[in-house]
Image (tube, grey):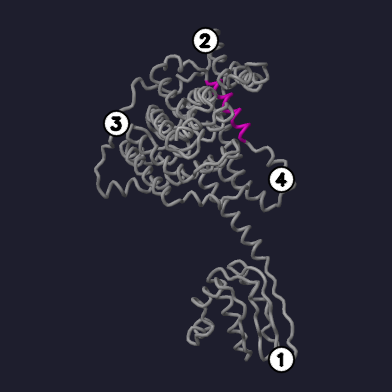
Amino acid sequence: MIESFKHNWLSNLKADTLSGIVVALALIPEAIAFSIIAGVDPKIGLYASFAICVIIAFTGGRPGMISAATGAMALLMVTLVKEHGLEYLLAATLLTGVLQIVAGYLRLADLMRFVSRSVVTGFVNALAILIFMAQLPELTNVTWHVYAMTAAGLGIIYGFPYLPKIGKTVPSPLVCILVLTAVYLATGMEIRTVGDMGELPDSLPIFLWPDVPLNLETLKIIFPYSLMLAVVGLLESMMTATIVDDLTDTSSNKNRECKGQGMANIGAGLLGGMAGCAMIGQSVINVKSGGRNRTSTLVAGVGLLVLVVFLSDWVSLIPMAALVAVMIMVSIGTFSWESIRDLKKLPMSTNMVMLATVAVTVSTHNLALGVFVGVLLAAMNFANKVGNILYIGSHEAENDKAREYQVVGQVFFASCKRFGEAFDFKESVDEVTIDLSRAHFWDISAVEALDRVVIKFRREGTEVQLVGLNEASATIVDRHAIHNDAEAVEKLMG
């Protein structure tokens, strides 16, 4: 246990601490912006980010991943806040946490194995584009100072690591923020700062039970929102965990992450915060700044609270251009540039899945919808490919009055038509043997296709024998086939 504690908390202490501070600074404008999207006070997002970050550091299944208030979740809260107010949002946040814990115990995170690599790539590219697009309001209708500061920030971020000795010691995004803040204070130029985003809280969060009636009517109001928040939150968290796994070449416990997200959201709701989930932008900042362990997530959460409550006067002076530069770095680092190069090499179906995921996600700003479309297209492509891997051959028996068909491959809803069209029902033979020893029947559609083949042969006066069914196929055929039931046959064939 002691060794596990040292590995998860102390093995990368310096880098985790510094990267956590960078993430804390980057979280402030994001949390304020997402609060504004949801229609609540900025402190709601800031308190939520603090609570979720700290709790997930202990309960999460992916060390080094950052969770806080997010834009995807904020978009789902708008109608609830507008129609019912903050108290119902807090109640919905608590229920969201409960649903996510239940999902963890049901091991729903195992469903991530059905998400193909092309969907993950599309998800990553869409998020990179959305992160960049989110910075555009800070770069439009502004003075040249903003562009100069942003360009200088990018120069520091990409150039500082090449300095001897200190280049690898201090995260370059932190240097960017400190240097540009110092330049802003020294010159007094007129550019937007963090303080212009909204008022920072001046007190610690307190325990707050939602002031809503505990009855069925309240449940009817909040349950649809909580269900959507739980699904989107877990989906984004699982996808982000997969990306961090790849970046760090380590594995994570995604079912534990589901439970951790649930506990974090319950904690956020009880401290007056909104629901949140994993943030790919901040997680990439953390990893690229050297953060690997739970310490970095804890430092980010605690650092956020210290900055906004005790150092708000200083934090409010950070120029937004510095944070914009950091987020542009994140978008550049997040985007899978190899996917553009691989468009010529990969199959068209794979490219279509990736591009569809990007297009839907970027156009709707709905990560869940984009992933759903990608998974659906990937499943359809897979079913089509497997459905085409079906061979049905035949040969005449010695007496020329019998024929044997050999079926090789998978018979299911996508290959049923091909299966049914492979037999010659008009051939003048007394007996047909269908060898199924190298075939597998997967679903009711396959059984129905087999029924139709047998029935059509018998209507032509041909005797049919089925041989070689494996145990699994025989089970589903025996349970659902009707070709030996005369009454059912008449009903099927009209």
Q: Residues within 10 Å of mark 2 (few under 14, many from 20)?
A: few
Q: Which residue is mark 3?
A: 207
Q: Which residue is mark 1?
A: 401
Is the stretch drawn in magenta largely helix, strand or loop? helix
Residue type of the residue flagged with mark 3: Phe
Stretch of the chain drawn in magenta: 320-334
Q: Residue 414: horizontal and vertical position, in percent?
A: 61, 66
In front of the other: 7 or 142:
7
Q: Which residue is mark 4?
A: 343
Residue type of the residue flagged with mark 4: Leu
Q: Residue 64: horizontal and vertical position, in percent?
A: 51, 33
Q: Residue 1: horizontal and vertical position, in percent?
A: 44, 35
Q: Mark 3 or mark 4, which has the lower sequence index?
A: 3
Circles 3, 4 touching at the beta carbon (< 8 Å): no
State the separation of the CA atoms marked 4 and 1.
54 Å
Q: Mark 4 or mark 1, which has the lower sequence index?
A: 4
In front of the other: 151 or 246:
246
State the separation of the CA atoms marked 1 and 3.
85 Å
Local SS, label 1: loop
User: Which of the two discs, 1 and 2, sits closer to the camera?
Assistant: 1
